[in-house]
Image (cartoon, rainbow, N blue to C red):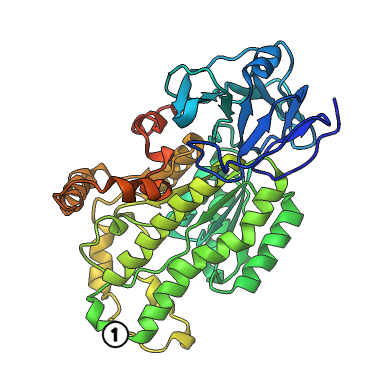
Amino acid sequence: MPAAMNLMRTSLAFGGSSSRWATSQGVPGARHTTDFVVMRRASEVTVPVAASAVILMSPRFRDSIGASLAAVGPDEAGVLARGSSVATRQESRPGGWLATRLLCRGRDSRSAPDRPRPAASACRSAETTSLVACRNSHDVRMQDVSGKVAVITGGSSGIGRGIALAFARAGMTVVVTGRSESHLEETAAVFADEGLTVDPMQVDVTDLGAMRAAADEIAARHGGVDVLVNNAGIGLTGPVADATPDDWKWVVDVNIGGVGNGIQAFLPIIRRSGRGGHIVNTASMAAIMPIVAGLYSMTKAAVVALSEALHIELRGEGIAVSAYLPGPVHSNIATGTARRPERYGESGYTPAPAAFVEKARQQPYMSAEEAGERVLHGVRRGDMFILTHNEFAEGVRDRHRAIERAFPDEPIDDERKAAIPFLLSSDVYAPDAQLPSPRYGAVPAS
């Protein structure tokens, strides 16, 4: 095999001195600037396991090598081999280009040499006569989680502890972080009672330096990180007008800034492994049903938007990002605001009275452990959204219909539409990109 020239993680590296590389600029219908490689004379193509790319081939080149992509471990290279075959449907593009979704199979040379990667979903079908574009799949499922390293911020109580237990029971190496030393000790005891191991760390998610130091320590101790759950959050509730400036700052620092700090600290480590991964950002049903708790809903809506954008950015590297939107779950979120750091001053909200907290404990809410199992299910499926409570479905549909009805009743401005295709949609929302609704307790859909 010729020596490969490394370009970008999200591009192709391909061999042969006569190979030619080009960006998607000038390629009709191309949606990304760095995912397109034009090959006219190269004898073979190598692709890193984390690559996301579109291969543009002349018909003669296609016919001579076929188009079956083998992806292997990050220390090796996949090859578009002469004489291989393609098993896909095709999609026409403007100007006579043809997009073909490859059947992507391969192996991780270090752990499971004979296990194929799941096949990609096919593109729509059409025929043209010009160049052929083959697009690598964005399969981000993690069905085999055993041995993976997971970090859960806010993992020392409530939903975070439920997620940690679900992960540990599935054979993952689990690290939980939190501010409360007593909660961390309690979590360690709960794990020990089940014969499980957990690595507790006292870290404040609002401190980026501390988060980066923790990420480095975890990577050194456990050999990397595969799954990050940005779960730490606070539940300030009450009328927006009653909030003090410090309330605004605290809820934003923790619920948005804490997620950002987690991404900045751990994403470089996940990427560095070259084996993909998963990030779960805990939002809330309040993000898409902001009926009460305006400040809290605002921060959780931001988490959903961030998660969607990051999922679209990272899926080509084999990294999924989920927005996790639980409904009511038995946790200590109502009492967590009592541990408000002094630097955030006074609140405009009164703490939840003991009678309210006790009443909440008696409600038929979901258990933290069940909520955690549903996160594990979503990670295995590679879901962009992880929802837990079907009771919200009708209200969410009503809200979405209200949004749709707010669009102006007037013709589309075709010229304006043509100028902004990159803003109008993404293939992650396409019907054929969706898995069936989750059936909890069932084996994740393949």
* Image spot of residue 32 (x, y percent): 54, 44
239 to 138, vertically: above or below: below
Callout 1, which amino acid?
Gly
SS for tag 1?
Answer: loop
- The reply, left or right, for residue 249 in relation to residue 321 is left
* Residue 216 in which image quadrant: bottom right
At 68% from the left edge and 18% from the top edge, which residue is drawn?
61
At 36% from the left edge and 71% from the top edge, which residue is drawn?
335
* Image spot of residue 182 (x, y percent): 53, 69
- Can residue 446 be seen in the rendering of this structure? no
- Label count reads 1
The residue pinned by badge 1 equals 348
- The reply, left or right, for residue 198 in relation to residue 301 is right
266 to 445, vertically: above or below: below
* Image spot of residue 19 (x, y percent): 76, 31
114 to 364, vertically: above or below: above
At 23% from the left edge and 55% from the top edge, which residue is drawn?
363
At 76% from the left edge and 56% from the top edge, which residue is drawn?
220
* Residue 203 in which image quadrant: bottom right
* Residue 132 in which image quadrant: top right
Give the camera-side residue of 171 and 25. 25
- The reply, left or right, for residue 250 in relation to residue 114 is left
Specify few, some or many for label 1: CA neighbours under 10 Å numbering under 14, 14-19, or 20 or more: some
- The reply, left or right, for residue 23 in relation to residue 407 is right
* Image spot of residue 78 (x, y percent): 73, 27
426 to 292, vertically: above or below: above
- Can residue 54 be seen in the rendering of this structure? yes
State which quarter of the image contains the N terminus. top right
